[in-house]
Amino acid sequence: MIRIYIIGAGVIGRYHAEAVRKLSVEEPVLLKVADPNQQTLSVFQEAFPEAEAYADAGVMLSEAAKEDDIVIIGTPPFTHFELSRMALKSGRHVLCEKPLVMNGKEAEELLELAKRQNRMLGCCSDRFLGLSKTEEVKQLLLSQTLGNLYKVTFVYRNQRSRAGVEYQPESKWFLDRVKSGGGILMDWGPYDFTVLNDLLNPEAIEVVAAWTSQPVTEIDPADITYDVEGHVGAMLQYCLPEGKKVWVQYERASCTHGEPYHHVELEGTMGAVKWSPYFETDEVVFKQDKEGQVNTQESLIAHNSPYTVMDHPIYYFYRKVRGLDSRATINEQAVFNLQCLQAIYDCAETGLSQTVSMLSRNELVSFPCK
């Protein structure tokens, strides 16, 4: 039997609990949950009566740890560092909601602690890894069907989908940088860079230029702190193995007065492939030359699995803890992905290019480019 502890009994905690129920097919699970809000805890208990409930996470984690215990952190970002640190110190593996923490410094501290404790530190930003359509794109890359990859476009522009305003309006902490760490980049950037970095496997990423903006609307909240970006963009150079380099055009908007659209495409010297790594469509569009003309091949590649994207984080992490094949984003990779977001913010603020390097899977460094 494996023991799983959820800290945070809110909406995302309930999603994790649903995934934990599915894990019982793999082996029996003892589920425990902690939340200081009694009403939130009661709602959770009604849905998951099998869970042992606690008002205090420290009390929940005070029992002796077992080798395969897993703690899931499902609370707002400003709490991630302290709760993850407490859970790691208790001797347990930690799977934290995205963003992993508020900044690169916190991420590095947690990684160091996890390694000292011989525990795994994971991030839920891996929700969209392993989807059949994206695995097909990865195979096109690995097989060199696209030729030499030279450009990646990764653009998602929504006109009105701000967390804390149009989406989940009751959660105003999304709008306060001190509590959220940032706006749309901290909200969806963890997914974006987990997908990109899994596809391209970079050794280093240089953020050459970046910008952020906060478009104004007539329903902007005026009685609370609202200081996060709704639109962000960056031009990045990915340094791949064997000295290869690829340009990545990145853009995210939860608020823009411009045209809404999404466009994710890899372009190589021998072909190009376009798809959505998220919910929009299962279509994969591959284009290559045939007798001097563009030949287009369209495929619908649905993902058939009992585990949904909301189940993936705990399912992948559980398999990693058990020593099985897994797509889990853990340790150095989880920290590297977070540092990519930090580098975009730093570049936008200072006007200086920034580089994040994974010198090895055991050493990370982030520094301004010269």
Image (tube, rainbow, N blue to C red):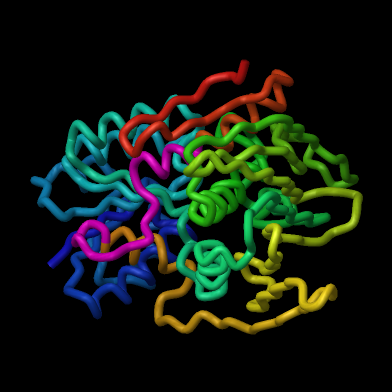
State which quarter of the image contains the N terminus: bottom left
Residue 198, placed above or below residue 237: below
**Where is 161 relative to 319, above or below?**
above
Along the line of sight, which residue is nearer the eye, 172 or 290? 290
Residue under the point 52% across and 67% down = 143
Q: Is residue 329 magenta?
A: yes
Residue drawn 44% across and 66% down? 15
Location of the C terminus (image quadrant)? top right
Q: Position of residue 93 (x, y in %)?
A: 24, 48
Q: Nearer the viewer, residue 346 or 228?
A: 346
Q: Position of residue 264 (x, y in %)?
A: 70, 60
Whether residue 69 is visible, yes or no, is yes
Tell me where the magenta segment starts and ends, as one range: 320-338
Q: Residue at x 32, y 63 (%)?
A: 326
Image coordinates for residue 221, horizontal then vertical, percent = 78, 41
Q: Position of residue 249 (x, y in %)?
A: 73, 46
Residue nearer the viewer, 319 or 359:
359
Q: Residue at x 50, y 63 (%)?
A: 142
The number of callouts visible is 0
